[in-house]
Amino acid sequence: MDRQRYMLDTNTVSYIIKGDPASIQQRLVNVPMASICISVITEAELLRGLAKKPKAKQLALLVKEFLLRVEILPWDSDAANTYAHLRTLCEKEGKPLGAMDMLIAAHSVAEGAVLITNDKAFYRIAQHLVLEDWTQTK
């Protein structure tokens, strides 16, 4: 049986790197590291954040260490196809997301992954995604 995958969005990764809130750290301890992944889109957002803060040396070290430890899923044709359909559907429903959020959402759907986020934008299209908010205690 395939293991459940958990795709962390950019906000969730930021919380992990900062070590807060504790609820995320607790959830991470209970999930096999092999089940945790991020989209290459999230990697791009993290690297852009670092590019905007060239003097944040400690943050850069933490981000790079995180990226070495997590599986980064490449964008592929399945993700592109899912993006095209999901974006069209959401636009018809009058619920478009920002460009990067839509790419991450589509990637999680294409991978059959639970998207871990507390970003309210994703919850506007929750009927199309599998979402969990690890900032909330169980």
Image (cartoon, rainbow, N blue to C red):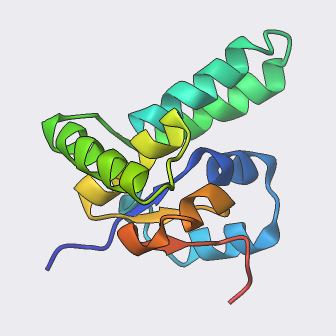
Q: Residue at x 45, y 44 (%)?
A: 102
Q: Which of the 4 image quadrants contains residue 49?
A: top right
**Quadrant in which the C terminus appears:** bottom right
- Residue 13, horizontal then vertical, whole percent: 63, 48
Relative side of 96 to 17, left or right:
left
Q: Residue at x 67, y 62 (%)?
A: 120
Q: Which of the 4 image quadrants contains residue 4?
A: bottom left
Q: Is 138 placed above or below 67 here?
A: below
Q: Is 65 placed above or below 120 here?
A: above
Relative side of 14 to 57, left or right:
left
Q: Is 55 placed above or below 103 here?
A: above
Relative side of 59 to 134, left or right:
right
- The residue sitting at the bottom extreme is 138
Decide if residue 92 is in sight here: yes
- Residue 123, horizontal then vertical, whole percent: 57, 67
Q: Is 41 placed above or below 33 here?
A: above
**Quadrant in which the N terminus appears:** bottom left
Q: Residue at x 79, y 55 (%)?
A: 19
User: Which of these two is toward me, 76 or 30?
Assistant: 76
Q: Residue at x 16, y 44 (%)?
A: 78
